[in-house]
């Protein structure tokens, strides 16, 4: 008899007023008992609607059944048969739009907590099983991967498992992409989770070369012609920050979310003993409504800001961030200024931000995206006094690779052109993740990396015959 | 890890180092830079590539110890390793097709100007160098410059060495004497670049300056290195670091670069390597 409780087993969390002063993980994870209890809520549906909502088709009812039996090791095997980074996806997937969005239990109550269970299984395995991954026999074929974000890591993992000799070239000093420089520690622990997943890839024989800005230090042509790589995967993400092009964006105290988050997450500006400086202030506005904006706002609060405002031009319903992040941000005291759009940033006599001038918006007719278009309300301008403004209005792909690789085409947004099999317009070059789609999600990037790995295998093996 | 293979003190505050980085050594061109990080807790600091030796796989940097990271770097010795050394970053300076150039350096900016002078000279351009310093005891690179230019003019603010005066005075003098430059490169403190650009503007001489805003990644992903050039926002690490000297908003750059001064001053007082106040 399944557990018919309408609600998910609650996630143990740090109290809002405690956690908004530290960088420890907010959600602390299920205990074994909680996991088993939650797992019994799954109806083991024959047609598996949840699986169709997952971009990498995690065998959800099967792994959950093992959790319910208390066989966590077996559950882990099932999850990792299609998802190489479950500890990460369980934490950051927008489950409400994916697996859990399709769960039948969600019709009359809350869906099964698939993400939390996936995380539990992965964390349990890391804590209890220390056996090293076996390094497969090499097949002698060399593949280069550019970018160590989720797309590149998953492509590398899939290929290494099949015996390919994989080298990842990463521009930053640490592998992980957005997982290390963007998503904050309190949502995704770096040492405990990300570094461990990367360690597993190394055990499989993946060679990671950091400090390599490809396109500058080596070109794709050199990888093929001089270094003997037979295929290249480009997973360079979409890391270029957009600005609004409004007056005052050049003032001191205006950051891109990328800069702000990089200083804090990658460069650890929040920790004693690190050299990276960051500005501390009482009042901060974060412009935008996505995951990135929520992360920047919650970091600002943890850095000691008293008033943190999310300034977003549409309404609550259109906020693109994960539901859980919005909920957590509100609990932590972030103030939402919705239907509000900045028109300029105002500075003091030293060129330092003193306020952000906004205009009220109202929702008009639906636009191309199907969301109601916000239109400014004439004469409703007002100022919010702040000392810092963080621009979090989206990013686009970095042109470094495409501008240095003949034959590699991009669309007008700068995204690399790739077909369903991740093949680009240049033979032997494959691409996936944000570099192709524009800013999207971790799991889509991982899925693309996996698809590319299959295509690369076929490409190299077919060339041989 | 990147090993320091040679270290030389050029004056009391300026050090020259050769670092083993074969990939960069093979690729670097004049005007490009690297970013180093001392260790796992360090910040990312940009320095210009002063020279390279592709055969030996080494990259030369010349830096002034001004704050925490550069002071720590100056404490390191031959045989020590840097955690990170990334490059070559930024665009190479466009030096093709000039016949007569004047390369001007101010202080440690001379180290940044040197590779451009060398590259121009090797492309059969006639090169004059004006190397400006505050005073005799901080003059650097005199012998190096002599090998890569047609005329070397050294100026000191206090007249203790070379000619007394600012580089701008010397430049004006050379222009007045009929030298027809088709390119001026000015690298040094922000006010110096600003005033050199003012001197060349009326003559319409193409003037390149090398901007040094605060940087993090150096690949265009943070926007921290924003500068205003001709009314547009540019990212110095990917669009530069060289820009048209007549279009740069120098006052804004000056403000940006002092943003972390308070925090850096506090940090600089404590050296992590020596674990003592310096
Ligand atoms: C703050 C923030 C929060 C987010 N929150 C979520 C979330 O909760 N859930 C979710 O699903 N998604 C979230 N996302 C989106 C998600 O992180 C991305 O969609 C995903 O990381 C894309 O993966 P990727 O591998 O394509 O690119 P990235 O993760 O961007 O990795 C690209 C890597 O390539 C490297 N690189 C770039 N150029 C070069 C070069 N020339 N040479 C060498 N290396 C290069 C970069 O340094 C980087 O390491 C968030 C994004 C941000 C910024
Ligand atoms: C592209 C580029 C190339 C450079 N090339 C060289 C070089 O070849 N040799 C060299 O000696 N220096 C060079 N610089 C400047 C060098 O990066 C700074 O001196 C260094 O960042 C100071 O770091 P620090 O931790 O030692 O000092 P900090 O403690 O960070 O700063 C000390 C003082 O310097 C100011 N400062 C910080 N960063 C910069 C900066 N980027 N430019 C100017 N002032 C700054 C601070 O506000 C403070 O007043 C270059 C800078 C750039 C952007
Ligand atoms: S990978 Fe993401 S979408 Fe798929 S089951 Fe796990 S949490 Fe759900
Ligand atoms: S839809 Fe929900 S209840 Fe049904 S199998 Fe999937 S997780 Fe279990
Ligand atoms: S240093 Fe980050 S964009 Fe230039």
Image: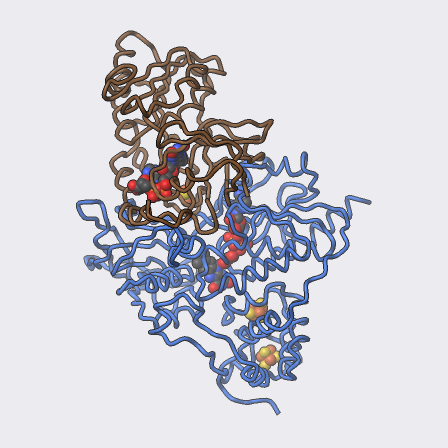
Q: How many marks?
A: 0
Q: Of all residues shown, which one is farthest toward the left?
A: A349
Is residue B27 found left or right of B205 in the rendered image?
A: right
Is residue A404 found left or right of A351 in the rendered image?
A: right
- Where residue A135 appears, x then y in whole percent? 72, 57
Q: On screen, B193 above or below A71? A: above
Quarter of the view holding residue B227: top left
Quarter of the view holding residue A325: bottom left
- Where residue A44 appears, x then y in whole percent? 64, 82
Residue shown at 74%/53% (left/top)? A163
On the question of residue A440 being in view, the answer is no
Residue shown at 30%/30% (left/top)? B189
Is residue B172 found left or right of A100 in the rendered image?
A: left
On the question of residue A172 being in view, the answer is yes
Q: Quadrant of ligand 5?
A: top left
Q: Of all residues shown, which one is farthest toward the top?
A: B178
Residue sitting nearer the eye, B47 or A229: B47
Q: Of all residues shown, which one is farthest toward the right?
A: A465
Quarter of the view holding residue A302: bottom left
Q: On screen, B53 above or below A5? A: above
- Where residue A424 appears, x then y in whole percent? 62, 45
Q: Which chain does blue denote in the image?
A: A
- Colour applied to chain B: brown
Q: Quadrant of the C terminus of chain A?
A: top right
- Where residue A167 appears, x then y in whole percent? 64, 47
């Amino acid at each position: 008899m399944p557990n018919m409780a309408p609600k998910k087993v609650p996630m143990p969390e740090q109290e809002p007023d405690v956690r908004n002063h530290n960088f420890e993980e907010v959600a602390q994870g299920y205990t074994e008992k909680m996991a088993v209890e939650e797992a019994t809520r799954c109806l083991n549906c024959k047609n598996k609607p949840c699986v169709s909502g997952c971009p990498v088709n995690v065998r959800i009812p099967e792994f959950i059944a093992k959790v319910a039996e208390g066989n966590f090791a077996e559950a882990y095997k099932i999850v990792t048969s299609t998802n190489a980074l479950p500890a990460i996806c369980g934490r950051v997937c927008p489950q409400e739009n994916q697996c859990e969005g399709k769960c039948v239990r969600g019709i009359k109550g809350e869906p099964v907590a698939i993400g939390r269970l996936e995380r539990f299984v992965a964390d349990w395995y890391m804590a209890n099983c220390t056996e090293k991954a076996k390094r497969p026999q090499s097949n002698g074929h060399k593949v280069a991967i550019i970018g160590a974000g989720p797309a590149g890591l998953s492509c590398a993992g899939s290929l290494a498992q099949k015996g390919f000799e994989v080298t990842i070239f990463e521009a930053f000093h640490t592998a992980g992409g957005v997982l290390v420089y963007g998503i904050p520690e309190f949502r995704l622990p770096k040492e405990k989770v990300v570094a461990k997943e990367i360690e597993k890839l190394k055990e499989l024989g993946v060679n990671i070369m950091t400090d390599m800005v490809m396109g500058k230090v080596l070109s794709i042509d050199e990888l093929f012609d001089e270094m003997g790589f037979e295929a290249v995967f480009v997973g360079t993400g979409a890391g270029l920050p957009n600005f609004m092009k409004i007056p005052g964006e050049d003032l001191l105290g205006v950051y891109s979310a990328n800069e702000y988050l990089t200083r804090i997450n990658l460069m650890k500006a929040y920790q004693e003993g690190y050299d990276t400086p960051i500005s501390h202030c009482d009042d901060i506005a974060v412009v935008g409504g996505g995951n990135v904006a929520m992360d920047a706002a919650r970091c600002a609060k943890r850095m000691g800001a008293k008033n943190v405002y999310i300034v977003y031009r549409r309404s609550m319903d259109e906020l693109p961030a994960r539901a859980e992040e919005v909920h957590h941000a509100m609990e932590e005291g972030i103030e939402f200024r919705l239907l509000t759009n900045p028109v300029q940033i105002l500075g003091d006599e030293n060129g330092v931000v003193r306020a952000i001038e906004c205009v009220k918006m109202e929702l008009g007719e639906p636009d191309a995206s199907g969301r109601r278009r916000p239109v400014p309300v004439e004469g409703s301008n007002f100022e919010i006094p702040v000392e810092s403004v963080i621009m979090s209005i989206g990013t686009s792909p970095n042109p470094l690779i495409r501008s240095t690789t003949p034959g590699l085409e991009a669309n007008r947004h700068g995204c690399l052109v790739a077909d369903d099999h991740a093949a680009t317009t240049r033979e032997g070059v494959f691409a996936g993740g944000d570099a192709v789609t524009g800013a999207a999600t971790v799991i889509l990037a991982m899925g693309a990396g996996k698809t590319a790995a299959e295509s690369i295998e076929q490409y190299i093996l077919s060339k041989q015959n | 890890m990147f090993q320091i293979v040679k270290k030389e003190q050029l004056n009391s505050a300026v050090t020259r180092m050769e670092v083993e980085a074969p990939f960069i050594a093979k690729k670097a061109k004049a005007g490009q830079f690297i970013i180093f990080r001392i260790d796992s807790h360090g910040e990312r600091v940009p320095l210009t590539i002063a020279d390279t030796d592709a055969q030996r796989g080494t990259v030369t940097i010349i830096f002034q110890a001004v704050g925490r990271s550069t002071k720590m770097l100056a404490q390191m010795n031959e045989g020590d390793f840097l955690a990170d050394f990334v490059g070559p970053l930024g665009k190479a300076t466009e030096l093709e097709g000039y016949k007569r150039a004047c390369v001007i350096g101010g202080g440690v900016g001379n180290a940044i100007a040197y590779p451009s002078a060398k590259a121009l000279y090797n492309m059969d351009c006639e090169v004059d160098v004006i190397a400006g310093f505050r005073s005799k005891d901080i003059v650097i690179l005199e012998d190096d410059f002599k090998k890569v230019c047609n005329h070397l003019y050294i100026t000191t603010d206090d007249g203790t060495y070379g000619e007394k005066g600012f580089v701008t005075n010397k430049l004006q003098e050379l222009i007045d004497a009929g030298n027809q430059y088709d390119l001026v490169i000015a690298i040094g403190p922000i006010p110096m670049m600003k005033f050199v650009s003012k001197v060349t503007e009326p003559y319409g001489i193409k003037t390149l300056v090398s901007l040094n805003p605060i940087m993090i990644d150096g690949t265009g992903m943070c926007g921290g290195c924003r500068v205003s050039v001709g009314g547009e926002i540019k990212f110095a690490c990917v669009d530069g670091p060289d820009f048209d000297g007549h279009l740069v908003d120098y006052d804004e750059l000056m403000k940006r670069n002092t943003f972390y001064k308070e925090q850096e001053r506090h940090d600089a007082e404590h050296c992590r390597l020596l674990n003592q106040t310096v």
